[in-house]
Image (cartoon, grey):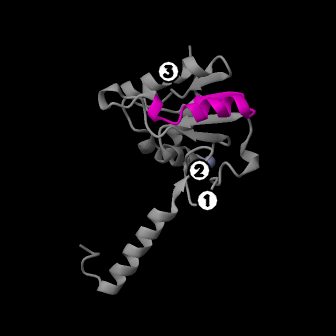
Amino acid sequence: MHLLRQPEEKIRTFSNALLNARNQVGQCKKCFHLTAKEECEICSNHSRSNGLLCVVADSKDLLALERTREYKGVYHVLGGLISPMDGIGPELLNISSLIKRVTDEEINEVILALTPSVEGDTTSLYLGKLLKVFVKVTRIAYGLPVGSELEYADEVTLTRALEGRRILE
Ligand SMILES: [Zn+2]
């Protein structure tokens, strides 16, 4: 309603800015986080390569974890979760690039930060099986209510979830 009451010129400027943002924002070639550059700010920050790689479903979850300011490693954005009901199989997610990173980069631990839901559990199990031959795989657990979206969890809960991560059996 507020927008509709603005002068036409103002709305035009606003919609052009939106369109520009949409056209400029792409995906980081390394981690698939949203960025206007080839490589996102996290991947190009060398102090962040400390052996930890955190796997998230999408950029919203990455941003939620960044808000905790506790995690100092890098990320890998899957682009969704495995969901046979919706026809989303592992081949539609950024998984082969994840395996490549785990084997090419110096990664000591992969932290699976996926929503505690059927899809999140399925994806974690799948990734755990694939990755634990190469690297230690943990999953955040503590304090996250089942079925809750990661992006809506508060910073304290997320920090505890990160600290309480467990090795995936
Ligand atoms: Zn990146």
Residue 21: x %, y % from top left: 47, 66
Horizontal arrangement in the rendering, residue 161 relative to residue 4 (left or right):
right
Q: Which residues are magenta?
A: 91-111
Of label 3 and label 1, which has the lower sequence position? 1
Tag of residue 16:
none
- Looking at numbered disc 3 in the image, what kind of residue is underneath it? Tyr
Residue bearing mark 3: 126
Residue behind label 1 places its C-beta within 8 angstroms of ligand 1: no
- Looking at numbered disc 1 in the image, what kind of residue is underneath it? Lys
Residue behind label 2 places its C-beta within 8 angstroms of ligand 1: yes
Q: Residue at x 61, y 48 (%)?
A: 29
Q: Circle 1 sits in a helix, a strand or a loop, which is it?
A: loop
Crowd around label 3: few <14 · some 14–19 · many ≥20 (10 Å): few
Horizontal arrangement in the rendering, residue 69 relative to residue 49 (left or right):
left
Residue 65: x %, y % from top left: 55, 43
How far is disc 3 from disc 1 in space, using C-alphas? 31 Å
